[in-house]
Image (cartoon, grey):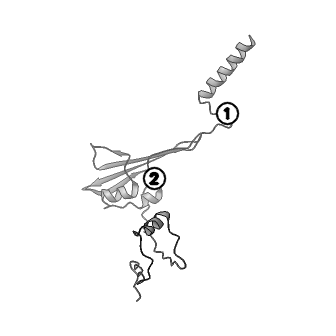
Amino acid sequence: MQKLLISLIAATGVMLAGCGITSWPGVYKIDVQQGQPITQTLVDRLHPGMTRQQVSFVMGTPLLADPFHANRWDYVYTYQPGGGKREERRITVLFEADKLVRVEGDLQPSGKPQARTGPKETSVEVTGEPPPKSLLEKVKGAIGLGESDAPGEPERPIPSPGRPQSR
């Protein structure tokens, strides 16, 4: 009788654990994120007159591109932190003649001009010894296929775009 009772309690515990009861302390629930993240910064980059390609570059591929409404793209983003309240953001982008005319939804462009952020120029001057050769370079050098180590005319640096080159 005791064995039957212990087996019944163990089986009940296993079934309850498999049912997904998550109110017990120590149970971990993952964050669930679906769709393209929609932020105010992204929406502020949108302005009337942009092409479909430009909008797609800024916002990403739309979640919904309805073949019956080809001039409307819908973006939906949901985020639910583990055990928390679900957040949802929706944006609808409308086109006329393949140009952006209107943005509707939870976030609107602020109208403030956005500073364009692009790659910044950086230059690094390397001095000292060259890096050690890889195994492949050593093998190529041993069989005569690698670059020669003979002194010759030094290589000229490649000029950076937009900077005058000094001679």
Q: Is residue 121 above or below residue 106?
A: below
Q: Please tell me in which quadrant of the rendered image residue 166 appears.
A: bottom left
Q: Nearer the viewer, residue 19 or 43?
A: 19
Measure the alpha-carbon separation of dots 2 and 1: 33 Å
Q: Amino acid at mark 1?
A: Trp
Helix, strand or loop at mark 2: loop
Q: Dot 2: within a 10 Å radius of its alpha carbon, few (fewer than 14), some, or many (20 or more) residues? A: many
Q: Is residue 123 above or below residue 89?
A: below
| Viewer-side label of 2, 1 | 1
The residue at 62%/39% (across/down) is 28
Outermost residue on the top side: it is 1
- Residue 134 image offset from top left, x and y in percent: 50, 65
Residue 4 in sight? yes
Residue 118 in sight? no
- Label disc, if present, on residue 24 of the rendered structure: 1
- Residue 51 image offset from top left, x and y in percent: 30, 59
Q: Nearer the viewer, residue 24 or 99?
A: 24
The residue at 43%/56% (across/down) is 108
- Residue 23 image offset from top left, x and y in percent: 65, 33
Helix, strand or loop at mark 1: loop
- Label disc, if present, on residue 38 of the rendered structure: 2
